[in-house]
Image (cartoon, grey):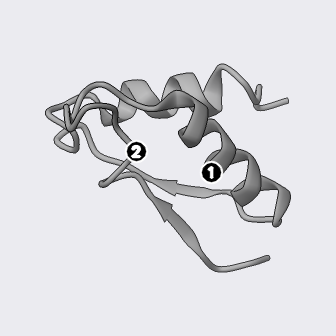
Amino acid sequence: MKNLGFGMMRLPVLNGNPTDFDYEQLNKMVDAFLEAGYNYFDTSFVYHEDKSEEAVRKALVERYPRD
């Protein structure tokens, strides 16, 4: 098991807006992290004006089912 977490506190955004996520870039980052064999994502509802967990859902959960 690899021990590294992907912190979701500072995600790529568009136009400097903390809730306008650059999903193209974020998806690439998530894909690279998973392909490297890591699987721990650290997030909190307070990151990105309470929108970080929504971004994680779109970039990770909706694209990589748990099964």
Position of residue 17 relative to residue 29, above or below, is above
Residue under label 2: 12
Question: Residue, x 27% and y 28% (percent of image)?
Answer: 51
Q: Residues within 10 Å of mark 1 (few under 14, many from 20)?
A: some
Residue under label 1: 29
Question: Residue, x 14% and y 33% (percent of image)?
Answer: 49
Q: The N terminus appears in which quarter of the rendering?
A: bottom right
Q: How many marks?
A: 2
Whole-number angstrom distance, CA of label 2 to CA of label 1: 10 Å
Secondary structure beneath disc 2?
A: loop
- Is residue 39 shown left or right of residue 57? right
The one nearer the camera, 25 or 9, is 25
Task: List x then y, in percent, for residue 12.
Answer: 40, 45
Dot 2 and dot 1 residues touching (CB under 8 Å): yes
Position of residue 35 relative to residue 12, above or below, is below
Q: Please tell me which of labels 2 and 1 falls first in the chain.
A: 2
Question: Residue, x 31% and y 54% (percent of image)?
Answer: 10
The one nearer the camera, 43 or 26, is 26
Q: The C terminus appears in which quarter of the rendering?
A: top right
- Is residue 58 shown left or right of residue 3? left
Task: List x then y, in percent, for residue 5.
Answer: 54, 68
Q: Quadrant of residue 44?
A: top left
Q: Residue furthest front?
A: 15
Secondary structure beneath disc 1?
A: helix
Task: List x then y, in percent, for residue 63.
Answer: 72, 24
Disc sitting over residue 57 in the figure? none
Amino acid marked by disc 1:
Met
